Image (cartoon, rainbow, N blue to C red):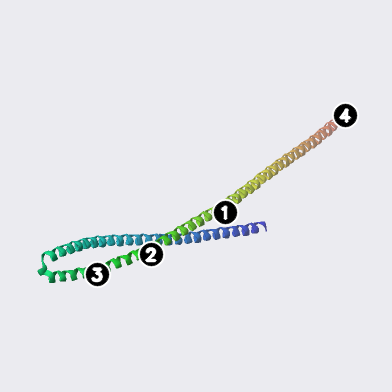
Amino acid sequence: MTTKKKKKTKFRKDTGGLAKIVSNAFSNYKKNKEQDKIKAIKLQKLEEKNSILKEKKELKIWEERLNKESNKIKLSEEELRIKEKEFRIKEEKLRVESDRLTKKDEELILVTKELREKEKQLKIREEEQSRKDIDLKVREEEQTQKELKEQRRKNREMKVLKEEENKKKELEYIKIKEWEEKFDRDQKLKEQEEIKREQRLIQKENEKRAKFENLENNSNNQVSGLEKFTVDKSKEN
């Protein structure tokens, strides 16, 4: 009955250990999934930053072009004013050129509007990116707290397991010690019984020897008595 109970309790402890292993594997799987999500977010963030930098460079190039064009226009307008004074004959040509420059200004205005619109969009994207960075930081902190909490839980479990293991070892040591002491007592009792048995055998041997010697003495006395009796009878005759 005691051996069956021990086997049952051992099976229950083994299933508990398996449950802990499965729980640890599941928590590790969740942690790896969360880390993969964080890595994907970081990669997306890096790509968006690169895209923003590229668009900023393009905007800068456009601004430089606009400045150059603006300077050219200013020079052209100055030249036109000089030419108006100097060349009245070329008035029609100057008007055409003026129309061209006006269209160019309109184009520049449109480009400027587009640049402003892009700047607004970039600002919005930067704000969104900032919010994403904050959200990512919060998630990383939460993940760190979860990992710390999980580590503390594992440490507590390890401590409990070590304490249980130490208790088992102590109980086993006590049982072994008790068994050794019992074995020593049994051995001593057996040795004492063996000594007593040998003493009884020796005593019986001595008693047998004494009886045999008594019988032998009695028989010798009887023989000597018979011999004397026969001698006396012969003398009488």
Residue type at numbered disc 2: Ile
Residues at marks 3 and 2, CA–CA distance in whole angstroms:
27 Å
Compared with 3, 89 (above or below) is: below
Residue 144 image offset from top left, x and y in percent: 48, 55
Circles 2, 4 touching at the beta carbon (< 8 Å): no
Name which residue lies at 57% across and 54% down: 157
Please name whichever residue, 182 or 187, is drawn nearer the observer in this view of the structure: 182
Circles 3, 1 touching at the beta carbon (< 8 Å): no
Which residue lies under the disc numbered 1? 157
Tell which tag, 1 or 4, sits nearer the viewer: 1
Residue type at numbered disc 3: Glu
Residue 125 image offset from top left, x and y in percent: 37, 64
Which type of secondary structure does the marked residue at label 3 adopt?
helix
Which residue lies under the disc numbered 4? 232
Q: Quadrant of residue 224?
A: top right
Q: Callout 3 environment at 10 Å: few (<14), some (14 to 19), or many (20+)? A: few
Tell which tag, 1 or 2, sits nearer the viewer: 2
Residue type at numbered disc 1: Glu
Which residue lies under the disc numbered 2? 124
Q: Quadrant of residue 193?
A: top right
Tell which tag, 3 or 1, sits nearer the viewer: 3
